[in-house]
Image: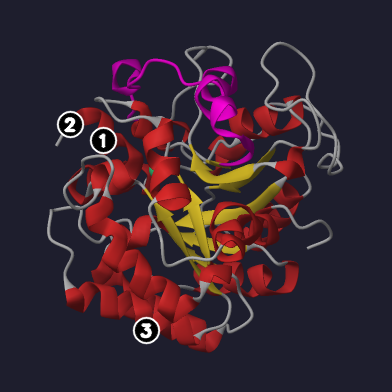
């Protein structure tokens, strides 16, 4: 598996190693460096400058629900302990570089996922959200073992963060959600409409199922089909484990990271039977398309390849249902104001 593919977190082996390091970090790394942030910009604003994503209303186009950005400026935005500059592959993926791929495809809004390089310091992501009002929402990473993680959640929510990325780290997959910090996060998520966004393999799904029973009002997003097919075959038992979450009304699945799953080759049509089953189980209103850039634009894969699978190849969807996958579901989960 290539380095570029691995760095997205789709590779379980790479992930475990990195996340162990991240878990060892102090919450002190989450300091925002004294920057003052305004409230999340109102919908309808359009970013200025050559790199802007849209000419008109940002709500008019597609929403990419999963992208990572980073900058080579490690002086202003230092890497977390344990990460090296040469591990940033590509060396740079700024919002402007993203726009070059996304804009020709009609994507006008994007959900940013905090990159592992930065540990618990979400400041680069927050800076990007602030720089391009109305274009981005954020999914942050915080330390759930710190006292009162809900305080940090609410602070970040003031700056455009709408979800929090969680993963088993070095904990057993059957108990990784049992801690007090996780309970506090899920409770706050329910109260504030902030999503718990899961980077997991299928073996972690039963623990999520139990948390959904405890916290039925917490929005829950499963990234990249729970990485079903990352090692090649799309196993029925894995798809069934994912489908079991559908009985919880606030669970959502990202239809994403096609470059890394199944045959890992455009047009990715081998993933269609799984997507069809998920549409049957969750309904289009709880599925959202995403690229997982920059990894979707590496090694011969393209942004357009990813969009085309959902826009052009899912014949069983009506036009209205396709709109949910490409725009409306992600808008409701990540861009709803006053959540
Ligand atoms: Zn990713």
Which residues, given as a range, are shown in magenta? Answer: 82-111
Measure the C-alpha gap from mark 2 to mark 1. 5 Å
Magenta highlight on residue 321: no
Query: What is the quadrant of the C terminus in the image?
Result: bottom right
Q: Is residue 172 visible?
A: no
The mark nearer the N terminus, 3 or 1, is 1
**Mark seen at residue 166:** none
Q: Residue under circle 1?
A: 5
Which secondary structure lies at badge 3?
helix
Magenta highlight on residue 99: yes
Q: Quadrant of residue 203?
A: bottom left
In the image, 129: left or right of 147? right
Q: Residue under circle 2?
A: 2
Residue 67 or 139: which is nearer the viewer? 67
Above-or-below relation of 267 to 244: above
Query: What is the quadrant of the N terminus in the image?
Result: top left
Q: Circle 1: is it few (<14), some (14-19), or many (20+) Cα within 10 Å?
A: many
Label 2–label 3 contact, CB within 8 A: no
Which secondary structure lies at badge 2?
loop
Q: Residue at x 48, y 77 (%)?
A: 282
Measure the C-alpha gap from mark 3 to mark 1. 28 Å
Q: Residue at x 25, y 44 (%)?
A: 260
**Mark seen at residue 244:** 3
In the image, 32: left or right of 13? right
Q: Position of residue 59 (x, y in %)?
A: 75, 44
Quarter of the image where ligand 1 sits: top left
């Amino acid at each position: 598996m290539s380095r570029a593919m691995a760095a997205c977190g789709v590779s379980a082996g790479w992930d475990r190693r990195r996340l162990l390091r991240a878990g060892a970090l102090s919450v002190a790394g989450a300091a925002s460096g004294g920057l003052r942030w305004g409230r999340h910009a109102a919908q309808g604003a359009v970013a200025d400058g050559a790199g802007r994503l849209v000419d008109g209303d940002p709500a008019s186009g597609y929403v990419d629900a999963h992208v990572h950005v980073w900058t080579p400026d490690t002086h202003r935005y230092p890497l977390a302990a344990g990460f090296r500059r040469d591990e940033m592959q590509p060396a740079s993926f700024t919002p402007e570089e993203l726009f070059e791929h996304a804009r020709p495809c009609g994507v006008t809004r994007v959900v940013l996922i905090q990159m592992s390089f930065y540990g618990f310091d979400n400041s680069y992501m927050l800076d990007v959200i602030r720089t391009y009002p109305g274009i981005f929402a954020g999914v942050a990473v915080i330390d759930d073992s710190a006292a009162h993680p809900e305080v940090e959640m609410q602070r970040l929510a003031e700056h455009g963060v709408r979800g929090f990325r969680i993963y088993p780290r070095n904990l057993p997959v059957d108990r990784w959600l049992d801690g007090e910090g996780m309970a506090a996060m899920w409770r706050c998520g329910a109260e504030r409409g902030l999503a718990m966004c899961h980077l997991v393999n299928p073996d972690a799904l039963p623990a999520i199922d139990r948390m959904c029973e405890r916290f039925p009002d917490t929005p829950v997003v499963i990234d990249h089909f729970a990485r079903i097919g990352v090692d090649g075959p799309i196993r029925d038992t894995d798809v069934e484990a994912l489908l079991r979450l559908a009985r919880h009304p606030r669970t959502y699945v990202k239809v994403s990271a096609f470059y890394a799953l199944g045959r890992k080759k455009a047009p990715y049509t081998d993933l269609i039977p799984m997507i069809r089953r998920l549409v049957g189980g969750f309904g289009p209103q709880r599925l959202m398309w995403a690229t997982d850039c920059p990894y979707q634009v590496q090694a011969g894969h393209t942004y357009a390849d990813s969009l085309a699978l959902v826009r052009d190849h899912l014949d069983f969807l009506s036009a209205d249902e396709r709109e949910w996958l490409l725009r409306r579901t992600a808008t409701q989960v990540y861009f709803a104001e006053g959540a």
